[in-house]
Amino acid sequence: MTYHYVVLGAGMQGSAVAYDMAKFGDASQVRLLDYDLALAERVAADINRLTGNTLVVPGQVDVRDRQSLLDNLKGAHACLSAVPYPFNPQIAECAIEVGASFCDLGGNTDVVKQELALHEKALAAGVSIVPDCGLMPGMGNTLAVHGMEQLDSCEEVQIRCGGLPQTPKPPLGYKLVFSIGGLTNEYFGKAVILRDGQVVEVDTFDELETLELPAPLGTCEAFTTSGGTSTCPWTFEGQVKTYEYKTVRYPGHYEKFKLMRDLGLLELDPVQVGEQQVVPRELFHAVVKDKIDFPEDRDLVVLRTTCRGLKDGQPLNIEYTLIDYHDEATGFSAMSRTTGFPASIVAIMMAQGRAIKGGVPLEKAIPAGPFLEELARRGIHVEVRHF
């Protein structure tokens, strides 16, 4: 059997998703839709050249227009959203209405809860709604599920993840691997974790630690950021005592960013500058974006998920480590690969009927073992260590 997919958004992540579906998804067609038709056409042509087929068909959509969404989703087995997360609840509703399963890259847990509230409607329509399916939130949590399944009981899950330049440069030892607004959003607010068996909120950009990672990374730092745990603290409450996530950066990044934060340069409350009201964070985005973009520099992604518990009455730690690099053959960055490919795997599993029906958190929706097998098919290698 072949499947009809729809991808919303033809940017860095959406292009990787469409490529993956065309190559691994038993696709009859992959419709790649964007508000910018010229972008969708250019990206579709590139993907068809890479895959040697004509499965990816470009088109235009305005995701703010409900009727446009309904018209474009008709006939799809699965739809994946690679557009900003505020649009995802309406897209999910439209997918249910036309009988298509839906997943997204997520990143905001409050929005995810709105999508999961569509459970009964999705169940009645016989489709799956699965948010937060990218890298983090996403793949790291699926690795945690796999680790928990290997243990008789799990006490603790620790996840560390970062998208980084292969060669760090001043001023921050960092290059943008997604939007600068997404970066600062992760650094502010509260993070939801499991600690001492309870769901709690902790401050973001806090709890700095040092960790050792395989070459070429070596000594890095990690600190609390928002969104990575997604719905896992609620799902695993009562089963796991600790479930935490931190973002990985090269040494020194935290101190430099904290200085800007402490000086108020990332606040959201407007300040008076002459005759103008200026939002400091918006000014920061406008001034700093190009200073840390480095579009020609290659990136890497590091992900480590560690599960600690008991097996056959003995303590056992299971550690999953993934380091992925910019792919010169396809041109996809490490962040595109490790965000787009895992999300595409979920969409393909939904189309194939291998995901649970209804509005379901990722950690419950798909089988973790086959997910790891699919990663390996795509050349994304996860080292597993027991100790």
Image (spheres, rainbow, N blue to C red):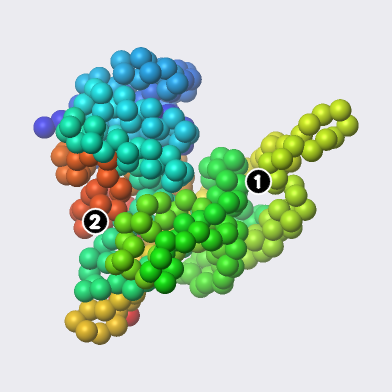
Instruction: Give the residue number, with chain letter if any, for mark 2.
Output: 368
Instruction: Give the residue number, with chain letter if any, for mark 1.
Output: 292
Q: Quadrant of residue 44?
A: top left
Q: Give the image location of residue 21, x and y in percent.
A: 28, 36
The quadrant in which the N terminus is found is top left
Residue occupying image coordinates x 36% and y 28%: 91
Residue 328 makes an appearance in the image: no
Looking at the image, is 262 positioned above or below residue 147? above
Residue occupying image coordinates x 65% and y 46%: 292
In the image: residue 28, left or right of residue 137: left
Query: Marks 1 and 2, how far apart in space?
Result: 36 Å
- Under mark 1, the amino acid is Ile
Going from N to C along the chain, the mark reached first, 1 or 2, is 1
Residue 86 makes an appearance in the image: yes
The quadrant in which the C terminus is found is bottom left
Q: Secondary structure at mark 1?
A: helix
Q: Give the image location of residue 295, x and y in percent.
A: 59, 41
